Image (cartoon, grey):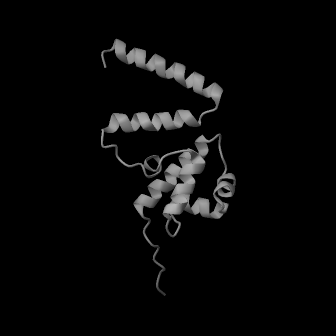
Amino acid sequence: MSKIQKKPKNEFLVGVGKNIQRFRILRNGMTQEALADLIGSNATYISKIETGTADGLTLIMLEKFTRVLNISVADLVDLPSPEGEPLQQSKRLSSILYTLPKHDKKFAEKILIMMLEALKEKGV
């Protein structure tokens, strides 16, 4: 009896799926069902995308995810920044801060200001 071989996961799709999951959760713990409703799909498909087991992902679906999650395609596919890693991290941080509720944004801003001041004191 021969074993059924599983198709190897596409690392790019796995990465996109993880980013979709991360940004979905950052949206006040949005469920897969809620995301599916917003993009006109179902939770099973969202689960497959997030685990990298969907049979592909169209550009139209990528656009829907970026629109609903209010992120860029670069955030979703995690493309390297041509300007360098610090700028990419800054963009990621800005994207995460944008998703926070208003009261959390104020708290996060205070923490970031304290961190920047500490870095300046150390000459970094």
Q: Which residue is drawn at 30% across and 43% down?
A: 82
The C terminus, quarter of image: top left
Name the foreground residue: 66 vs 89.
66
Q: Is residue 27 above or below residue 41?
A: above
x and y percent of residue 94 in the render? 48, 34
Residue 42: % across, % down: 67, 62
Q: Is residue 58 left or right of residue 78?
A: right
The answer to whether residue 31 is left or right of residue 59 is right
- Say which quarter of the image contains residue 85: top left
Residue that protrudes farthest toward the bottom in the picture: 1
- Residue 104: image x %, image y %? 61, 27
Asked if residue 89 lies left or right of residue 46, the reply is left
Kindly indicate the quadrant of the structure image that contains residue 106. top right
Q: In this view, does 94 lie above or below 117?
A: below
Q: Which residue is drawn at 35% across and 15% down?
A: 120
The residue drawn where x is 65% and y is 40% is 28
Q: Work out whether 122 lies above or below 4.
A: above
Q: Given the current orientation, which residue lies at the most extreme top position?
A: 121
Q: Position of residue 6 (x, y in %)?
A: 47, 73
**Disc count in the image?**
0
